Image: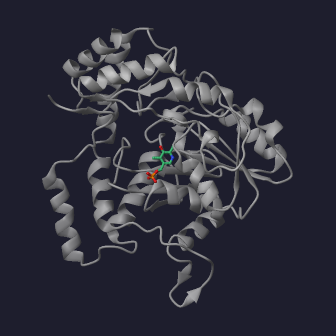
Amino acid sequence: MERINVTKTFLPPIEEYHQYVREIWQNGQITNQGPLLVQLEDRLEQHLGVSNLHFVANGTVALQLAIKALGIEDGEIITSPFSYVASTSAILWEKCTPVFVDIEPDTFCIDPDKIEAAITDKTRAILAVHVFGYPCDIEKIEEIAKNHKLKVIYDSAHAFGASYNGKSLMSYGDISTGSFHATKLFHTVEGGCVIVNDKLASDKVELMKRFGHNGDDHIMLGINAKSSELHAAMGLCNLKYADEIIQKRKAVSEKYEQLLGDKFLRPKAKEGLTYNYAYYPIIFESEEQLLSAVKQLNDNNIFPRRYFFPSLNELSYIESSNSCPISEDISRRILCLPLYDSLDNQNIEKICEVLSK
Ligand SMILES: *Cc1c(COP(=O)(O)O)cnc(C)c1O
């Protein structure tokens, strides 16, 4: 029996990758802002309708660069507890304190109405997550940030291909970061990006991602966040298929919708979203129900994932944090079903059949 995981990495036709590999061999340059990487950055900017996009090693270092480029060296960053661990670990790694604000019960994104109560004189920024590709309340967050002179970083790791009010969802905020990890809908094996709306901060990212120096001129503290020509080649291959992949994921999601009806609670999208079908989360009535469903799915060789569990305010290595009852509750009851472009109807039917029991 074929094993069905929560996702299956898209691999482009191998000949198309070979073509790029030959080009790399001819150029003789395999890293350090090579020609394919520059080409990928240009194509991604065109595809997303953004400027100042930096292709980097992964989506976690992208968040770290974002924090550094905005000049945040200590203090508090308001963030969402309902996310992949990297959005919080990046804050901790940069020696800042994550302050968790609970999520909206319908979008699972940070609740803007609870942000102001969490602002102190140490607050420097809001790091919000467009979770599952559903937009945060961008308008309210922008207003709060303006009133309190805070920076806004969006973790857009799930937002590739989604648009909001006619613009890429990745274009909002002072800085928006992406992940192109193999589990994401557009990938470069490992990879990520930093999209910077301010030219000066963008120049900082450019320097910081390659050790902070130009030749012998050491300008600022940097890190190695560079990617390679081989990763860029994978991105160039996959970008061609990005729209097609989203359409196929849409069809899979609609099939789930059709077979599951309103059996499970689902996140609600805000008006103005063109969705990217990044994930298919369902909410159970209780954690017991979820665990029993997972067991039955596993017995049928189907492996969904508990995205996102636990709620990040409950991480053992966080010193102290306020409780976030909605995030804690949703985290225990949410499951992401298998979703990828080549998932066929027969398997979707099997998954829904097990779930219906
Ligand atoms: C995947 C992911 C990241 C981390 O990206 P990597 O490229 O794996 O480092 C960060 N935030 C969220 C929300 C993610 O899903």
Let me know if residue 205 appears in the view.
Answer: yes
Q: Residue at x 52, y 77 (%)?
A: 211
Let me know if residue 196 appears in the view.
Answer: no
On-image quarter of the N terminus: top left
- Is 86 placed above or below 185 here? below
Residue occupying the far right of the picture: 121
Q: Position of residue 139 (x, y in %)?
A: 70, 35
Left or right of 241, for residue 263: right
Q: Position of residue 290 (x, y in %)?
A: 44, 20
Pick the residue in front: 51 or 116.
116
Count the numbered circles shown.
0
Q: Residue at x 21, y 32 (%)?
A: 3
Q: Residue at x 40, y 72 (%)?
A: 33
The quadrant in which residue 160 appears is top left
- Is 334 placed above or below 321 here? above
Pick the residue in front: 36 or 210.
210
On-image quarter of the C terminus: top left
Left or right of 254, for residue 148: right
Pick the residue in front: 307 or 201.
307
Q: Position of residue 283 (x, y in %)?
A: 49, 19
Pick the residue in front: 121 or 292.
292
- Is 214 placed above or below 287 here? below
Q: Residue at x 26, y 52 (%)?
A: 237
Coloured how? one colour
Q: Position of residue 223 (x, y in %)?
A: 53, 72
Residue occupying the far bottom of the picture: 216
